[in-house]
Image: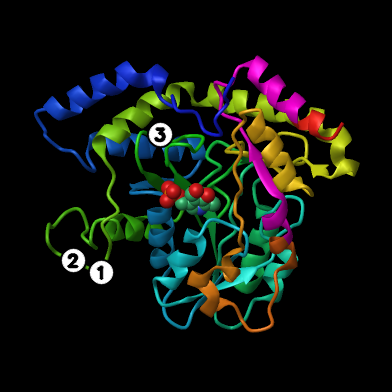
Amino acid sequence: MTIPFFPDDLFEQDRQAFLDLLYEVGTDDEQKFILGRRTAELERATAAATGVEHAVACSSGTGGLNLAVQAVGVGPGDEVIVPAFCCQPVASSVANLGATPVFADVDPHTMVMDPASTEELITERTRALMPAHVFSIMADMPAMNKIGRAHGLTVIEDAAVAQGAVLDGTPSGAWGDLGVFSYFQVKAFGTAGEGGMVVTDDEGLARRVRMLRNHGQDGITRFLHHEIGQNSRFDEILAAFQLHRIGGFADRLERRARIADYYTERFAPLADRGLVAPPAGRNGRCYYVYSLLVERREDLRAWLTEKQIGTHIYYPVPLPLQPAFAKYAPEGADWPRARQVSARNLAIPIWPHLTDFQVEFIADSVCEFFD
Ligand SMILES: Cc1ncc(COP(=O)(O)O)c(C=O)c1O
């Protein structure tokens, strides 16, 4: 039995629906393939599900972060505090505007941006904070918003991996001044291609994001460019597909959560033997991937590979130690907890159509390693 880290039949059950929608959009009299009525409907559905006023569909999660940072008005001379251990767009979205990503260390267990490290880095140049939810756990948004409010900073919530997650009754994406989701295929609400969504309650920011995603046009007068924007538009076929996929989303999330509950229970006894599982519970949890922290990571990985269980390492090198961001790493600065989780994290499969038998086999295999 081979269990890939991500399945190779992601949309098998939706294959016919996808072909039908392709035909429907392709033969529609409108012949509108981007930013049409289906995109607008997906935006309304996302805003309603997230409990926010506005949702703006865009080209990807990266595209959404680019739009969010630009909409806030970040530019040369500004600093934005981002996690030292994360996906690279948190930093490139800032650097691409000529501003400086400032890297905050992370919590050694949850791997999300640490509030105390964040607050220490605030200067008179800080313009925004960008906490990100990672893998299985939402960032500490109450603390981030408190810091943001205390210092008059905008909070951009990178919820790329966490659509559908809820912390203290508030959905991910709705905590920050702006939130960003990703539809990259393997995400919890992934699609058959690329996509993203920016969500916000702020009408002005929403209007700005909407203009920026389409070359700074206002959607009324074509070829009138109010400001320099981007091409971050959204595809109608994918909008139709996402509207179709909303149907099973809650069930897929629940299945992921149940698998996570099972793993966490099975792995709890290993805590003093070199394997730390994510914290138990459902509050503030997302299940994009299930990441363990393991002292003998390479050995466990080899063991699982031998059993044909796919694993993934997110991310082997913290952002400020990457060549691309070296110039934003102040001399002498260190991110010990980011280095530690980079050296220890190992993700195991959690996709929703894993069978109970497969889930048990994965858990057994991990436990056997420690026998
Ligand atoms: C935390 C985080 N932010 C942003 C992104 C970027 O999303 P996308 O791949 O849709 O550009 C990712 C992608 O994995 C991510 O994990």
Mark-to-mark CA distance, 3 and 2: 29 Å
Q: Residues within 10 Å of mark 3 (few under 14, many from 20)?
A: some
Please provide the residue range marked out in magenta. Answer: 340-365
- Name the kind of residue labelled 2 in the image: His
Q: Is residue 301 left or right of residue 62?
A: right
Q: Is residue 250 visible?
A: yes
Q: Are marks 2 and 1 in contact (CB under 8 Å)?
A: yes
- Name the kind of residue labelled 1 in the image: Ile
Query: Relative to 287, is 346 above or below?
Result: below
Residue that carries the numbered disc 3 in the rendered image: 45
Front residue of 116/322: it is 322
Q: Residue furthest front?
A: 306
- Name the kind of residue labelled 3 in the image: Ala
- Counting from the top left corner in percent of width and height, residue 49 is at 49, 35
Q: Which mark is residue 269?
A: none
Some atom of ligand 1 lies within 8 Å of the CB belonging to the residue at label 1: no
